[in-house]
Amino acid sequence: MKIERIEAFGLRGVTPEGGWSNEIRPEDCVHTLLAVITDEGVTGWGSVYTNDALVKGALDVLAPLYQGENALEPERVSEKLHQHMFWLGRGGSITHTISGIDIALWDILGKVTGQPVGRLLGGRYRERVLPYASLLMDQPEPLADHLRSVQAQGFRAFKMGWGPFGRVSHALDEAIVAAARAAIGDDAYLMVDAGGSDAYWSNGYKWALRTAQMLADYDVYWFEEALHPDALEDYVHLRRNSPLPIAGGEVLTRRQAFQPWLQAGAFDIVQPDVTKVGGISEERRIGWMAQENGVRFIPHGWNTAVGLAADLHLSSAFPNTDFVEYIVGSPFIDELTVGGWQLDADGMLAIPTAPGLGITLDLDAVAKYGGRAVVGLSG
């Protein structure tokens, strides 16, 4: 079974805010779906955390390397693409695009073999996982109202990030956290994402340590992106001295970039994004590396329903990966799959058991947000 062509669908119209200082607009494209089409008519779907113009440019560069390749060998084909692209730079739009190709190839392999991707990764340690509702911070009162409405949907874990946190005053930061904890109660998980990868993030180690101490007082489960994403030494010191777990790594790509961070002990929890790092193949290697260095692996998942499906299968393949990120209120999560997603009575999300990624894309929704008709493809 050979790769015949790859099509890209840039998602627009309802792009969720990211909390960035230079905020994205609903019509901006930061997520692109890829359809890998084979010569036998099987279609696999992937997701890329990159604007579609960049993805299409990367596909043009990569085309001589993937056209005619075996669609049933995701790890080898993806590594071939990585190895031949060193001269164009590692970690940018080409690496992100390879991520989507790799996810789609695992989807194809699962569909052809009749197995869910998690089983192909070596086996399923769990059949369901706890999703944490991921949302942006706000002033205390509207944030509390938002959290209560999300909790009413059945979520038992919550991560709030970016917004005014770390950007106004320590007093406001604590007021935000206090309001959130009061809104969801003492039994729910609460995580805080400072958004240190925002442009020109100005807070350093001393701010992060003081904030970590405050967050511990409110039983925050982890502190994410507390520092600038290049501040390796500061992350090492913060992890050693923080009273709560330190999480990060969402902006890193390929396993080679993660290695020094994991070996230095910069994180308690590492968060690669499957739509950036190189796909399922690369993220599995990062997860193994995390295990070897005593670091917990929990995927970053601020992307699409296809990325969420990939994360669910990755979580099934690692014994300690018992959370997945779920963006609340995003049509790119809620509307792209036939039947959508449902939490069970315990607030858990079932890991798909159908072949491949185990989801069926709603091609009308893909066409609606992708800006063009989906012709000749299966979901």
Image: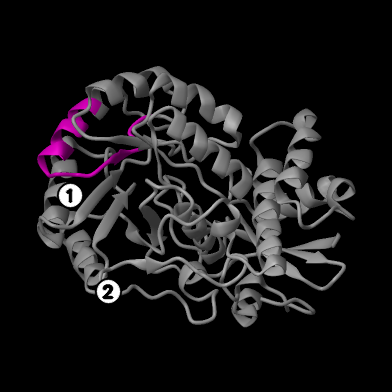
Vertical placement of 77 versus 353: above or below? above
Which residue is found at the position 18% from the left and 28% from the top?
210
Q: Type of residue at label 1? A: Ile
Left or right: residue 283 versus residue 312 is right
In which quarter of the view is residue 79 placed? top right
Of labels 2 and 1, earlier in sequence is: 2
* Mark 2 residue element: loop
The stretch of residues the image draws in magenta is: 209-227
Q: Which image quarter is the N terminus in?
A: bottom right
> Which residue corresponds to mark 1?
176
Tell me the number on the disc at residue 288. Answer: none
- Label 1: how many residues lie within 10 Å, few (<14), some (14-19) or many (20+)? many
Camera-nearest residue between 15 and 125? 125
Camera-nearest residue between 236 and 18? 236
Tell me the number on the disc at residue 153. Answer: 2
Q: Type of residue at label 2? A: Gln
Vertical placement of 135 versus 271: above or below? below
Tell me, yes or no, if residue 131 can be seen here: yes
Give the foreground label among 2 and 1.
2
* Mark 1 residue element: helix
Which residue is found at the position 32% from the left and 40% from the top?
194
Q: Which image quarter is the C terminus in?
A: bottom right
Left or right: residue 339 versus residue 343 is right
Vertical placement of 8 versus 323: above or below? below
- Label 2: how many residues lie within 10 Å, few (<14), some (14-19) or many (20+)? few
In which quarter of the view is residue 213 placed? top left
- Image location (x, y in percent) of residue 8: 72, 62
Which residue is found at the position 66% from the left and 57% from the top?
106
Which residue is found at the position 27% from the left and 38% from the top?
166
Camera-nearest residue between 54 and 159? 159
- Image location (x, y in percent) of residue 92: 65, 38
